[in-house]
Image: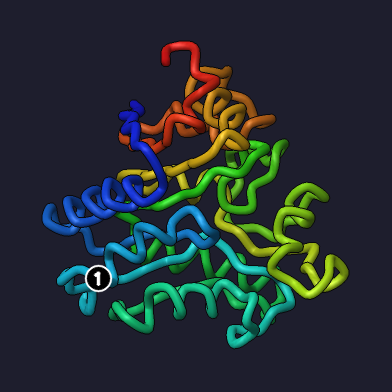
Amino acid sequence: MMKIIRVKDQVAGGKAGFKVFADALAQGAQVFGLATGSTPISVYDEITNSDLDLSEKTSINLDEYKGLAADHPQSYHYFMNEHLFSKKPFKASYVPDGLAPAASETKCYDQIIADNPINLQLLGLGQNGHIGFNEPGTAFSTQTHEVSLTESTIQANARFFANEAEVPHFAYSMGIASIMQAQQILIMAYGAAKADAVAAMIEGPVTEAVPASALQNHPDVIVIIDDAAASKLKNN
């Protein structure tokens, strides 16, 4: 079941997302699945400016570039520390190790998720409908895996690097099955560039061609979108 929250912009979306986060905490949530990218920053800003105490909670991040050390300025370890962990530390925070071998790291990460069932999972939405680094065509049964990034994702991420040649072409990501195990999911999308993906996620067929469409089969999904991202919905 999807509950859709319409907001005027990303700042308002951050406040709405913070409320979902705070409500989950009040209801006893212990483990939070976290995402990187520009979309969740407004939520993290609200969290860091709040009096929420996360010091006894656990966080598990969706993904990490393969080949980047945790202290690399473009690693997701670094991003999370800059935007959240340095200001609101958790008891334990897990991010895939980009320097570890794929076979051992993906197995290790699946065990971390099994040992720490996620109560609330935050997600952004890619323009091609990807969630985490699960690109179109990823099997819904996938758990943590090594991903070959599509050209469109590499180009979208190139703005963060000195040049496109420096952008990693592989990543470790929770799979769609891993994401779907979360008790509750919060997905956010802003801007007209996400409108097609939003419509496909909410109103399109459930298909591996649109990874986010799998969320139609989850019992508790909250979608936060602005008017531009909602503009292609038929039931507007």
Element type where label 1 sits in the image = loop
Residue at 65 percent across and 58 percent down: it is: 145
Note whether 196 is above or below 110 in the view shown: above
Instruction: Point out residue 107 in the picture as x, y percentages from the top left corner.
Output: 58, 66
Residue at 59 percent across and 31 percent down: it is: 197
Identity of the residue furthest to the bottom in this view: 71
Colour mode of the rendering: rainbow
Residue 30 relative to residue 124: left or right = left
Q: Nearer the viewer, residue 53 or 43?
A: 43
The residue identified by callout 1 is: 49
Q: Dot 1: within a 10 Å radius of its alpha carbon, few (fewer than 14), some, or many (20 or more) residues?
A: few
Quadrant of the rendered image containing residue 60: bottom left
Residue at 47 percent across and 65 percent down: it is: 61
Residue 10 relative to residue 170: left or right = left
Residue 44 relative to residue 82: left or right = left
Residue 230 relative to residue 121: left or right = right
Q: Nearer the viewer, residue 51 or 103?
A: 51
Identity of the residue furthest to the left in this view: 26
Note whether 22 is above or below 233 in the view shown: below
